[in-house]
Amino acid sequence: MASKPGILTEWPWQKLGNMKYVVLAPWVVQSVYSFVTKDERERDIMNLLIFPFLLLRLLHGQLWISLSRYYTTKAKHSIVDKGIEFEQVDRERNWDDLIIFNGLLYYFGFMYLPGASRMPIWRWDGLLLTILLHVGPVEFIYYWFHRALHHHFLYSRYHSHHHSSIVTEPITAVVHPFAEHLGYFLLFSIPPVTTILTKTSSVGVFVGYTTYMDFMNYMGHCNFELVPNWVFNHFPFLKYLMYTPSFHSLHHTQFRTNYSLFMPIYDYIYGTMDKSSDKLYEDSLKGRKETPDVVHLIHPITLQSFYHLPPAIASLASEPYSSKWYLSMFWPIPYEFMLFTWKFGSTFAVERNVFDKLKMQTWAIPRFSFHYSKSSQKDAINSVIERAILEAENEGVKVLSLGLLNQGEQFNGNGELYLQKHPNLKIRIVDGSSLAVAVVLHSIPKGTKQVLLSGNISKVVCAIAKNLCQRGIQVGVVCKDNFDKLKLGIPTELWINLLISTSYTQKVWLVGDGELSEKEQRKAPEGTHFIPCSQFPPKKVRKDCIYYNTPAMVIPKALQNVYSCENWLPRRVMSAWRVAGIVHALEGWDVHECGDTMLDIEKVWLASLSHGFRLPMLDHTFI
């Protein structure tokens, strides 16, 4: 919101939330009905194509946000070397309001404005008139209107909302109060309305002008420079007719310079051109090489989780992962993207974070969880993980942490496979087991005397059981095979605290790998604490029980550029496996943590706390 919101700040349909698209429904239905029922000579194809055109505009904006986030993750050509946070994501999640607003005006205009219906496909005179009107009145009036918006009265009530984003993203371009958009529409409608009134309008020019406005708007708000130097070297006059992302970025950092819409000529004429524009452009193009200190290696979970990756849909990525029915209709998109990246590249960067001087990146393997369960995919995926490790090694990365199924015990021996192949690696491979164990142990409610272990036995589960037995806590196991496996990893003198349990009376259940069925959960007493020990959470089926997150920690404020949620975890909460890699690098530990290796659990725990990480649930303390 603006610092002092004025009248008409909110959009008329703001209270509808995600249902706001229903305001277009009557117009869409009417356009289809009219096209179907009218005689062929009376049909207006333009009216029918408005809704598909709006969808294309949404797709256009989404492509820009994905491209921008991917390139800024690499940080090489970033203009402003700062991050964004959840506050900005929330403020800009209504970027599609402009498209809804334009859609309503399109339907109204093409229905009631004389000459707007049944346009020809193309007219050259309409194109020439549109260009002249944009270069002249539109750019000129916008320049002075924009300067007026920076007067303290209008700025505090309206334009400050847009300038809240110092580090811009493409969709920042269209995030303004409703009243401001009313002014923009009146201005930007000058060319199309004029061509309609002069009977020189055409479908091609209308669509082309709107697409041009979107393209330039989104491009100018990217936080990386993408206009190549040869453009201005070969055509020097273009520096007055086409701005660049770095040019407009200065407006968001300096505020009182570079007011122009898309053509800097008016800033040159009226002396508001920022003197550092050329230098910032050259520096941004030149770029800078940045080597991350820590890489966290993940993979999408399901086809729908693809849309929750940071470069995908910003609003979804900023919330814990949950299935959305409408995303099922677009399943070919993530699958085709996966196949494309699998063929032409191994991993792709999805996020970049900074913790003081420590630089971190998250890389994703282009495979989903169901691929990891297929034996035919095992060697291929391990090969991609191996290449990612070697790539990180060549770049000078200090620590690589394995997330989700990239560290499966049956898959690669908790990462031991890669050390066997490359015993002289300088990069440290971390599976995060020690911190995961510590988080689970410190999440168990105070006073607990018995726990029940369910699911498969893993490295983490064995370590938890051993620690509990050492502290005199009874560990119950339902399956005899799991009981026998645990005995192999626990000293004989501790077996007295290990037992086969069939009563299901324990109020604390430690849930390991493997699905915890609804039938099993129904056997738990009321108020049972379900505490996951695994990378994946159990399905919640009981309202009278307490379900914990998978092992995770709240991150300190110093960890910046966090604008997405890690899978199903809440905001600013990271999995213990990911935190472990960060702490490993911060402490400068020169050891691997993979295979059967387990670090000192208490040492890892205290190190994490010393760097500001903490448990999400502060009211639960270890016994």
Image (cartoon, helix red, strand yellow):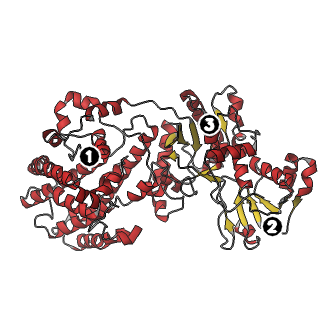
Instruction: State the image quarter where residue 101 is shown.
Output: bottom left
- Could you say where residue 198 lies in the image, as x and y percent from the top left? 6, 58
Q: CA distance from mark 2 to mark 1?
A: 62 Å
- Could you say where residue 258 lies in the image, as x and y percent from the top left? 23, 43
The residue indicated by pointer 2 is 506
- Image side of residue 575 versus residue 161, left or right: right
Mark 3 element type: helix
Q: CA distance from mark 2 to mark 3?
A: 38 Å
Q: Is residue 515 visible?
A: no
- Image side of residue 4 versus residue 497, left or right: left
**Could you say which disc has been placed on residue 585 in the image?**
3
- Image side of residue 339 versus residue 472, left or right: left
Instruction: State the image quarter where residue 254 is shown.
Output: top left
**Pointers 3 and 1 in contact (C-beta within 8 Å):** no
Within 10 angstroms of label 3, few (less than 14), some, or many (20 or more) residues?
some
Mark 1 element type: helix
Q: Quadrant of the C terminus?
A: bottom right
